[in-house]
Image (cartoon, helix red, strand yellow):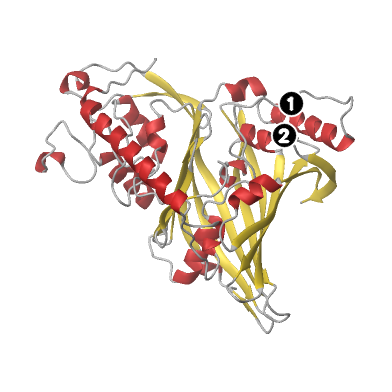
Amino acid sequence: MERKQGFFSALKQEVVRGLSPGRSRGRCESPMSRIGRRSKKQSQVPQPDLLIGRSGNLRPVETLSPLMEGPDPEGSECGDSRVEGWWGQWMKGQLSRAPSVSSSAYKGSDDLRLLLGVMGAPLAPVHVSSTDPLPHLSIKNTPIETSSAQYILQQYTAASGGQKLQNSIHNAYAMGKVKMLAAEFETANKVIKTRNSSKAAEGGFVLWQMNPDMWYVELALGGSKVHAGCNGNIVWRHTPWLGAHAAKGPVRPLRRALQGLDPKTTASMFTNARCIGEKRINGDDCFILKLSADPVTLKARSEGPAEIIRHVLLGYFSQKTGLLVHLEDSHLTRIQTNGGDAAYWETTINSFLDDYRPVEGIMIAHSGRSVVTLFRFGETAMSHTKTRMEEAWNIEEVAFNVPGLSIDCFIPPAELRFGSVSESCEFPKGERVKTAVAAAAAAAYRAKVAALEKSHEGNVNKIFWKMDA
C-alpha cells in the first residue's frame, strides 16, 4: 500500500520552494491561513539541497515545482503571482486527509461541544516564559521542599536532553491524532456510562511554538474545530459556538505542550514548585512537585459572576528516568447567579505520559491519555452532577527549528473580542461579561491590526526567504 505523505513532509517541500506562511484576515480562518506572495524573479532562483531534521533523522529534500491544492489561482483575479489563501487551504486539506481525522461526523453534538470546550485547549495555571533560566540549586537558607524541587528539575532537564540543547531550539512543531469520549455522566439519582468505545470522536491536532511565549494549536474533532493561540501578549481561542475571544488574566502556556512536548517550558512551569512527597504511578516511583496559582493571578482570571478560587498543578517525575510521567491539575470556580445560591465547578485533568523517544536529542512523549472530571455542586445537597471524559493521543511528527516560521503566524484573528468570555463559558449556562475597558482595548487593537495589514499588503510582493544550507 502506498504510504501517505506526512503533514510536515509536505510542509518541508513547500518551505524549500520559498512559500511563506502569512496572516489571515478571513472571519473564520486561522492566523496561518494565508501565504506570502513571491516574485517571478525569486521563483527562478535555484534552491540548494537542504538537510532538514524530522523526528530525529536528516534527509535531503528535492526542489520541485510548486504544487497547488485548492482553487487554481489562474482562474481568479489574483493571477499566477498571487496564491492568497493557499496556505489555509493546504493546511485544512492535510488535516482532513490525515488518518488521524475521522471521516464521519461525531453524532453527540452536546458531548462534542463539552469535549472541545474543556479538553481542546486548556491553559497552564500561571504565566511562565521559556526564556527564563532555571534557578541555581541552593541549599543554604532554602526550605527542603524548595531545594528538593530544584534538584528534581535539574535532573528532569538533564534527562530531557540538557539545557544547552534546549536553549538552541527557537521554534517547534508537532502533529498528532486524538480520540475523545464523554465516558460517564452522574447525578444524585443515576449514573449513565458510555460502554461502547466506538462512540468516541476521533480527530487530529497541529501545534506550533516559537520563542518567546508564542504558540498556536488547531484541533479538529468530529467535524468541528477549535483553534487557539498566543502572540506573546494575548491568549485567544476560537470555537464554532463562541467565535474568537481573548482569555482573561496573564499570558499562559498551552497545557497540551506540557504533556511531554515542551520540556523547557515544563521545567520553567515548576520553578516555584515544592516537593510534597512521593507516589507510585503505574509501577514507577515518582517525586511529586506542587504548584499553586497565586491570588493575583486568580483574581486577574476571574470575571463577573465567575470567580477562580484555586488552581493547583501536580507533576509526577519518575525517580528512575527523571522524566515527567503524570500531570494532574485541578481548578475550582465559583459562579454566583442573580438572586440564587452559588454553584461550584471543579475541573480535574489527569494526564499519563508514555512512549518517550528522542527527537533531535530532545525526549518527547509520543503517546498518552487524559481523564477529565467536571464536578458541579453547591446549590442543594442532591443537585450535584459529575461528568467524566477521556482522551487518548498519539504524536505522529515532531520537528524543531522549522525554517521560515515567523511571528506573523501567531497574530490573533481580526474579529477577536477582548475579555468578553470568562473561563466558565464552557460550563452549562456560562455567562458572558462585557466591559467598557474591553471594548476600548478591542477597538485599539483592531486599528493596530488594520495598520499592520495595510503595511503587509503593500510590501508582500517584496518578501524574500533566505535559508542556510
Q: Is residue 126 left or right of residue 399?
A: right
Residue under the point 59% across and 22% down: 167
3D distance between C-alphas at marks 2 and 1: 7 Å
- Taking depth in this image into account, of 300 and 455 the one nearest to the observer is 300
90 is higher (above) or lower (below) than 265 = below
Nearer-N-terminus badge (2/1) = 1
Furthest residue to the bottom? 189
339 is higher (above) or lower (below) than 189 = above
| Residue 237 in view, yes or no | no
343 is higher (above) or lower (below) than 166 = below
Per the rendering, the mark at residue 2 is none
- Taking depth in this image into account, of 413 and 122 the one nearest to the observer is 413
| Residue 198 in view, yes or no | yes
203 is higher (above) or lower (below) than 188 = above
Residue bearing the label numbered 1: 135
Q: Amino acid at mark 2?
A: Thr
Residue under the point 48% across and 65% down: 112
Residue bearing the label numbered 2: 271
Q: Quadrant of residue 413?
A: top left
Residue under the point 22% across and 38% down: 84
Residue under the point 64% across and 51% down: 299
Q: Secondary structure at mark 2?
A: loop
**Residue 145 appears at what percent x and percent y?**
86, 38
Q: Residues within 10 Å of mark 2 (few under 14, many from 20)?
A: many
**Residue 436 appears at what percent x and percent y?**
44, 53
Q: Amino acid at mark 1?
A: Pro
Q: Secondary structure at mark 1?
A: loop
**Residue 110 appears at what percent x and percent y?**
48, 71
Looking at the image, do the residues carrying marks 2 and 1 touch, with CB atoms under 8 Å apart?
A: yes
Q: Quadrant of the C terminus?
A: top left
**Residue 461 appears at what percent x and percent y?**
21, 26
Q: Is residue 54 left or right of residue 130?
A: left
